[in-house]
Image (cartoon, rainbow, N blue to C red):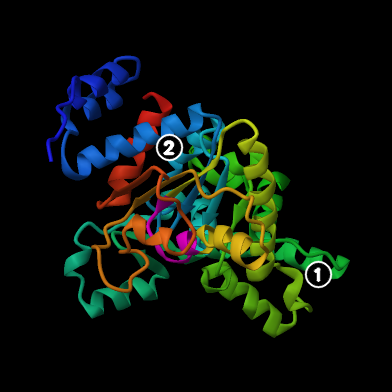
Amino acid sequence: MKVKRQTKRPEDINAALAARKGPVSRFVATHYRHFNAAALIDAAKGYEDHLAAGGKMLVTLAGAMSTAELGIILAEMIRRDKVHAIVCTGANLEEDIFNLVAHDYYERVPHYRHLSARDEQALLRRHMNRVTDTCIPEMEAMRRIEAAVLEEWVAADRAGERYFPHEFMYKVLRSGKLKRSYQIDPKNSWMVAAAEKNLPIWVPGWEDATLGNMYAGHVISGDVKHVHTVRTGIEYMTVLADWYTRNARRLRNREGSIGFFQIGGGIAGDFPICVVPMLHQDLRRTGVPLWGYFCQISDSTTSYGSYSGAVPNEKITWGKLGAGTPKFIIESDATIVAPLVFAWVLGQ
């Protein structure tokens, strides 16, 4: 089989595109030419093309992206209408706000690989909860937010009202009760940006997050009388199904589609991508289009039986992606890769 030679070199095409952008994008165009670096720039260009065609983008957040302060650039993506919906773990929902109010109390532990069990016990005694190289202060972050959101849980419970986890967090942010405690510029909080935009958010498996555990404790203690005051799980999926159906049909009339940009794996990615096969196979809404773009950033190696390590084409067999869907996988650390992709999309 004869391979057709490209008339224009990829690096020249990328350089021309980056010439209209800022220094970060020009650096990427110059140095990111092969392997995962090339996949990064291809995914970034695909993201741009998807939006230019009138599409919307759903971003999923797994891991500890909020503690990694991805909000610095993700907030700008939200403000600039480059992200139209988010699915995240409960940890990412709350940890962005933990950082918002307690940033100065966080401690970095660059030598975390060498900590002994005794060292970890010492951190526990100081109420410092470690996430890789960063310790979240329990009292200044977790308990402060617990006190603020508990007021909202109890008020809703007494009024017989029910809200999703992200809606309670929006209430806390919009109330202004935390403003005096801000320790970072709020423009670097993706949750503040999301609240300002009233961005659709889904938080599957919220129960295993710190605030989910705290909520369970308040239900057990009787502070909250009705366990279903916080809506979760299946109700989140029904809302996602409605959102996807309405937006996909609206976009299809304009030749756009909904894209899927996945950071990490796990429930944050698997929960939302399943909405399409559910609509097709269980509800027989066969006219609803598939996801129109797919990219995953993951350091999980390709493996057998692992969702995070599955290559994108496997999703074709599950009715999630089509054979012609633009698909990208960047096998790298999302804390390094995601800001570069976003910087390209933002023209930085």
Residue in the foreground of this view, choosing between 183 and 348: 348
Location of mark 1 (residue):
157
Q: Depth-wise, is mark 2 or mark 1 nearer the camera?
A: 2
Location of mark 2 (residue):
73
Judged from the image, the secondary structure of the residue bearing numbered disc 2 is helix
Judged from the image, the secondary structure of the residue bearing numbered disc 1 is helix
* 246 shown above or below 79: below
Outermost residue toward the left? 2
Tag 2–tag 1 contact (CB < 8 Å) = no
The magenta stretch is 262-270
Relative placement, left or right, of 272 versus 197 is left
Q: Residues within 10 Å of mark 2 (few under 14, many from 20)?
A: many
Outermost residue toward the right? 159
Taking the spot 25% from the left edge, 74% from the top edge, the residue there is: 119
Residue in the foreground of this view, choosing between 158 and 5: 5
N-terminal-most mark, 2 or 1: 2
* 283 shown above or below 67: below
Q: Is residue 160 magenta?
A: no
Relative placement, left or right, of 43 versus 242 is left
